[in-house]
Image: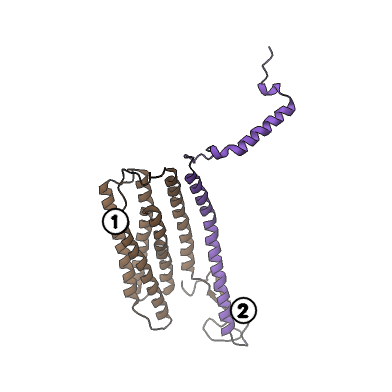
Chain colours: A brown, B purple
Amino acid sequence: MTSEMTPALATVSGGSVDGASTSSAVPRRRPLIPSGVLAMLIFVFTEIMFFTGLVSAFLITRASIGPGGWPPPNQPRLPVAATALNTVALLLSAVALFVAWRSLRERQRGVQAGSVSLRLGLAIALGAAFLIGQGREWIALLHEGLTLHSSIHGSFFYIIVGCHGLHALSALLALGWAFLRLRAQSLRSDTLAAVSVFWFFVVGIWPFLYYQIYL
Amino acid sequence: MSSIPPPVALLPVSRRRSLLRGLAALCWLWPSVVLACPVCFVAREASRLAFLWTAILMTFLPLCMMAGIVYFLWRQAQRSARENQGDAPPDSPKPH
């Protein structure tokens, strides 16, 4: 958000625009939350409802099948252990991203901080490792016969996990764009915060999906 | 040719009312074994509970999220107001 923009949610503070403290100065409006972060939060809320709808349909369908009927006996089992490793990589990427954002914020405040690009690069690498791991898992499952049309188990798996994968890919592209801006010395901490909100959503919803779908 | 009256018409009015009340009571008490919902394709307890909990979740989740962001903004506004009170010099104008 540039300084020329008028934030929708702002609080009025004393002082002047130029920073000089004069009694007749126009009060400076400071945003309570950066506009980009607020917009991303609203978007994430809609995405949470989207996934809640999908998981609700999945839970009702699974509950409608008798005990021992889920997953269907003639369908391949999901790789629980391999996906657990992917999950760890995804969670670590969120930690790396948080540290990168905090370093960038401290650096822009003039405080000595560690390498932002290294931490952001680590977050991207871990996120990419998760996606590649999921992709390999999908290929193996397709070879074993679990497809979108093979059963309702396959349909739910590919729709829910596939939607999450698409979100992870989009967020990873956004992180890549932020990384390029960082290399060009034009990345603001607010911008990285907005992108981080999306990535944290992707990371935060995954353990819930993993528990419901895989376990 | 006179039409044949329906069996209910043979009953006195007071009996008809009793019959109507009985049917209403039956409709009220019976749904536990009737598939009333068109998407409740299996009459299992687990299915009923899944419907119930997901309905509760999808009802309250948006409200909780909106309440969460409103609370967060309120906290931010309070913190900002405290910082302004601490930073403002004595002769500076009060925030509007």
The quarter of the displayed image where residue A194 is located: bottom left
Could you tell me residue B67's position as x and y percent? Answer: 56, 63
Residue marked by disc 1 = A135
Residue receiving disc 2: B95
Is B18 situated left or right of B73 in this image? right
Q: Position of residue A107 (x, y in %)?
A: 40, 80
The residue closer to the viewer here, B31 or B78, is: B31
How far across and down, in percent of the image, does residue B43 sit?
A: 49, 40
Q: Are marks 1 and 2 on the same chain?
A: no
Mark 1 lies on a secondary structure that is helix
Q: Residue at x 38, y 48 (%)?
A: A156
Q: Are marks 1 and 2 in contact (CB under 8 Å)?
A: no
Examine the rendered structure and indicate whether residue A86 appears above or below residue A180: above
Dividing the picture into quarters, in which one does residue A131 lie? Answer: bottom left
* Identity, as a three-letter code, of the amino acid under mark 2: Pro
Let me know if residue A168 appears in the view.
yes
Q: Amino acid at mark 1?
A: Gly
* Residue at 59% in and 82% down: B85
A170 vs A23, nearest the viewer:
A170
Instruction: Please determine whether, in this image, residue A112 is positioned above or below residue A31.
Output: below
Q: Please tell me whether mark 1 or mark 2 is closer to you in this view.
A: 1
Q: How far is mark 1 from mark 2, CA to CA?
A: 55 Å
Q: Is residue B11 above or below residue A54?
A: above
Residue drawn 56% across the image and 40% down it: B32
The residue at 41%/76% (across/down) is: A102
Residue B40 vs B82, above or below: the answer is above
Q: Chain of mark 1?
A: A
Residue A25 seen in the current view:
no
